[in-house]
Image (cartoon, helix red, strand yellow):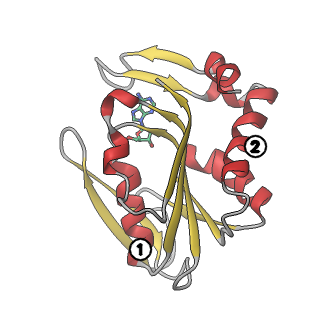
Amino acid sequence: MPELVKACIRDIPDFPKPGILFKDITTAIKDRDAFKRIVDYITDEFKDADIDYVTGIESRGFIFGAPVAYNLGAGLVVIRKPGKLPSEVEQMEYELEYGTDCIEIHKDAIEPGKRVLLVDDLLATGGTASAACELIKKIGGNPVGVAFVIELLFLNGMKKMPDNKNIKVVSMVKY
Ligand code: AMP
């Protein structure tokens, strides 16, 4: 039921910067049916994928990653903005429209070869998610799936996703 979820996502013009139409998911997660449908959708897409860890990207990826990990019987690993993780980290820089950004993961968060599902709220240019996949690989993990609640089709972010037939990439609501 992507339509029910879509109806609960709110557009905020010019946030956080002029010219950006921000997709606000707070209105979807406070709706009990929409929230359940989102979590059920991702769970269902990966229920037979033998996932060891779900990784959520700070901070909206945590909201969906945690219940999906619980449903799949997987562990939850967090990917965070710099300076937030207390133990030794590996980091990955990536390009933004203007400048660069950086994400971090604990070096020992994922044992070699473990099957990982990456979860985030929204796929725009794909820079964040592709950097997250690289980061997972850098510490030895095997990214086998990527799930988004929202995909902005006009930004062609899917093209940046790992070009590997063994990786399944899904999005629930498309604009
Ligand atoms: P990107 O790396 O370009 O694919 O951007 C994805 C990240 O930026 C996600 O973690 C989103 O939370 C956030 N983001 C980018 N564009 C938007 C938007 N229009 N509305 C809400 N969040 C966005």
Quickly name the residue at label 2: 40
Q: How far apart are marks 2 and 1 (CA)?
A: 27 Å
Q: Quadrant of the N terminus?
A: top right
Residue occupying image coordinates x 38% and y 76%: 138
First in sequence, mark 2 or 1: give its number.
2
| Camera-nearest residue between 83 and 100 | 100
Q: Which mark is residue 14?
A: none
Question: Where residue 136 sits in the image (x, y, percent)?
Answer: 45, 70
Q: Could you classify mark 2 by the number of other residues whose Cα lies within 10 Å: few (under 14), some (14-19), or many (20 or more)?
A: some
Is 73 on the left-hand or right-hand side of 160?
right
Residue occupying image coordinates x 72% and y 62%: 48
Q: What is the count of numbered marks?
A: 2
Dot 2 falls on a residue whose secondary structure is: helix
Whether tag 2 and tag 1 are in contact, CB under 8 A, the answer is: no
Quickly name the residue at label 1: 137
Rendered image quadrant of residue 18:
top left
Question: Where residue 19 sits in the image (x, y, percent)?
Answer: 29, 17
Q: Image height check: is 155 above or below 19?
A: below
Q: Is residue 81 visible?
A: yes
Task: Kindly give the residue lying farthest to the left in the view shown.
Answer: 98
Task: Kindly give the residue lying farthest to the front in the view shown.
Answer: 165
Is 44 on the left-hand or right-hand side of 161?
right
Q: Image height check: is 96 above or below 72?
A: above
Q: What residue type is labelled 1?
A: Lys
Question: Where residue 37 sits in the image (x, y, percent)?
Answer: 75, 34
Residue occupying image coordinates x 41% and y 60%: 132
- Disc 1 residue lies near ligand 1 with CB under 8 A: no
Which of the four quarters of the rendered structure image does ligand 1 lie in? top left
Task: Kindly give the residue lying farthest to the bottom in the view shown.
Answer: 112
- Disc 2 residue lies near ligand 1 with CB under 8 A: no
Rendered image quadrant of residue 53:
bottom right
